[in-house]
């Protein structure tokens, strides 16, 4: 959550060898294979409404196609494995992939991933984007709390202290546990950790690494200027000193854990 999936989606959705549905975050895997229940009727209808507001610039026939997909494929029916498979219009062949960019999938257990390979496909690869823990938490806090822009720093820190204790903040901060579960359930060779900083620092190499991981062709992802544009960002992403102090134990735990797992994290993360 708040680790660049929207940016990655915006570019990979153009790749001819990756098949996407009109909905970026389907959330079925988390709904069916964890104790979370994100696929409520309210959520589904909200996604339809939000999507229709964002496609006014598309051709009329494309708008109609997307609306029909939501109304006749995505929203109705019991949310079963067959429903999930039916969301993808084209079955992948050869080295083509179906893609689902649900950040809640990061919270699936080892047993959950194993069950997914039994129920859905034995060819599954996962990418897991790692962002500096405190900066990610700050971004999640600002996004989820919809904080008052006029609130003082002291008021924000008071709200943030409560937020860090919530289940959502805790589970999304468990990088090592989540990564271990995916690796154990899918096989370490089928899980690729990526570094959030690389999206801004070396976007072409970042996308190339995903293409190599999926064993698909290199695609021209436009010029570097467009690649470095920020998408779906949360304002004021630099955490105040007091917030960093609140995050200190989480940050230390995760950086040390990633280091033990041989994951090369940016030196900047240690300095902050």
Image (tube, rainbow, N blue to C red):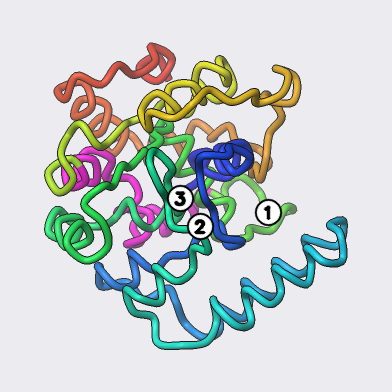
213 on left or right of 116: right
- Residue, disc 1: 151
In what element is the residue under mark 2? helix
Q: At which x and y percent is residue 115?
A: 16, 62
Residue 43: in sight, yes or no? no
User: Which residue lies under the disc numbered 2?
Assistant: 159
Quarter of the picture containing the C terminus is: top left
Position of 129 compared to 208: left or right? left
Name above or below for residue 197 compared with residue 167.
Answer: above
Q: Secondary structure at mark 3?
A: loop
* Residue ranking furthest to the top: 267
Residue 85 is at least partly visible in this image = yes
Given residues 7 and 252, the one toward you in this image is 7
Residue 165 part of the magenta-drawn span:
yes
Q: Position of residue 265 (x, y in %)?
A: 34, 19
Asked if disc 3 and disc 1 are in contact, CB closer than 8 Å, the reply is: no
- Residue 209 vertical placement versus 64 (above, below): above
Earlier in the chain: of badge 2 and badge 1, it is: 1
Queried whether the magenta region covers residue 201, the answer comes back as no
Magenta segment range? 157-182
| Residue 192 place in picture, x, y as percent | 31, 32
Q: Are marks 2 and 1 in contact (CB under 8 Å)?
A: yes
């Amino acid at each position: 959550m708040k680790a660049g999936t929207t940016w990655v989606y915006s570019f990979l959705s153009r790749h001819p060898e990756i098949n996407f549905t009109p909905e970026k975050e389907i959330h079925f895997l988390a709904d069916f294979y964890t104790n979370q229940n994100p696929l409520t009727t309210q959520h589904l209808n909200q996604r339809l409404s939000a999507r229709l507001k964002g496609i006014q610039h598309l051709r009329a026939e494309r708008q109609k196609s997307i609306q029909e997909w939501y109304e006749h494929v995505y929203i109705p029916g019991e949310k079963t494995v067959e429903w999930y498979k039916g969301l993808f219009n084209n079955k992948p062949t050869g080295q083509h992939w179906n893609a689902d960019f649900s950040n809640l999938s990061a919270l699936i257990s080892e047993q959950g991933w194993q069950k997914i390979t039994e129920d859905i496909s034995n060819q599954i690869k996962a990418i897991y984007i790692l962002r500096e823990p405190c900066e990610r938490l700050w971004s999640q806090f600002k996004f989820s709390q919809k904080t008052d822009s006029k609130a003082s720093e002291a008021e924000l820190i008071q709200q943030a202290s409560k937020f860090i204790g919530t289940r959502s903040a805790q589970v999304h901060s468990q990088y090592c546990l989540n990564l271990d579960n995916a690796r154990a359930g899918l096989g370490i060779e089928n899980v690729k950790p990526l570094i959030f900083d690389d999206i801004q620092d070396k976007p072409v190499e970042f996308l190339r690494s995903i293409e190599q991981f999926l064993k698909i062709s290199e695609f021209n992802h436009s010029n570097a200027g467009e690649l470095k544009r920020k998408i779906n960002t949360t304002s004021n992403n630099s955490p105040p000193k007091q917030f960093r102090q609140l995050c200190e134990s989480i940050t230390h735990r995760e950086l040390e854990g990633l280091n033990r797992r041989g994951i090369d994290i940016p030196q900047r993360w240690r300095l902050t």
